[in-house]
Image: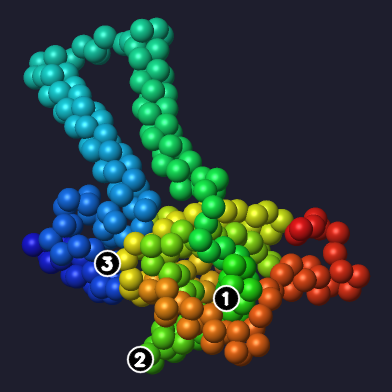
Amino acid sequence: MRSLALAAGVALALAACAPADQFPSEPGKGIDVGFLPSDRSLTDHTGGIIDLWNGSWIAALAVGVVVWGLTIWCIVAYRKRKNDDRLPVQLRYHVPLELMYTVIPILMVGVLFFFSSRVQGEIQDTSAKPDLQVEVYGKQWSWDFNYLTEDVYYSGDRVALTGEPGVEETLPTLYLPVNETVEFTLKSRDVAHAFWIPAFLYKIDLLPGRVNHYQVTPQREGTFSGKCAELCGEFHSEMLFNVKVVDRATFDAEMTTLRDAGQTGRLGDELNRQYNVAGGNNGEGSQN
Ligand SMILES: [Cu+2]
């Protein structure tokens, strides 16, 4: 009873970790979407990711049932009986058996790999022309957003999480127009970070010396949480941002605000940490 009460308490406490707007879900659709904290149509990719998730756990459960069944069957059928002190038959170098438990796991990994790589390929397919190009720089411990198509930029500062109410509204904010395809170009100014909007069900690394891309079309307005998902130093836990998916007019107004503040152009590689070392490049590889 005590451990049950403890488990219930932990579940309750963890449930409080996810504010409703961070993990939006369609009311009453929790089971339909496979317990994932999002809905199928939040972006053009969430449906495919939810299907991959559902397929994976159903397959894992099926494998689990077979393995548990065989385990229990062995325990029961080959248990030690009274007055029987003989050793059981000792089996080794049973080639068909060894082949079976080599080939079947390889097949299972192959199937998981096939479906994962198909979904990932769709997400990282950047062959379509995006409506908006946003270049994202991760930096210890905040974010720069260059709205390339709009020729304006936003530069974030780390926000200390003091626990005071309202502090999350002062986080760096990325604006995206609803129903328009955005292509993210993802870079790092210093160490490895990862760009993660949990509600979009996808994260991707920002690595020094490498450029990553991905396209997504947000299909519902709202405010979502974003965070760095790669331990990147002392204040990694405060490397947060907000994502506001808004209508075109609100987006344009926000771009005008940035433009009026003089934030035109982009903040490029010249702000990367290596360029601040005397002589420019410190010889540990180029970030271009
Ligand atoms: Cu980071």
Near mark 3 (Cα within 10 A), the count class, few <14, some 14-19 or many ≥20, is: many
Quadrant location of the N terminus in the rendered image: bottom left
Note whether residue 140 is visible.
no
- In the figure, is residue 122 to the left or right of 9? right
- Badge 3 or badge 1: first in the primary sequence: 3
Residue type for callout 3? Pro
Q: Position of residue 231 (x, y in %)?
A: 54, 64
Residue topped by disc 3: 24
Which residue does the image show at 27% across and 67% down from the upper left?
24
In this rendering, which labeled residue sits more in front, label 3 or label 2? 3
Residue type for callout 2? Pro
Cα separation between marks 3 and 1:
24 Å
Residue topped by disc 2: 165
Cα separation between marks 3 and 2:
21 Å
Q: Secondary structure at mark 1?
A: strand
User: Residue 152's quadrant in the figure?
Assistant: bottom right
Which residue does the image show at 42% across and 80% down from the upper left?
250
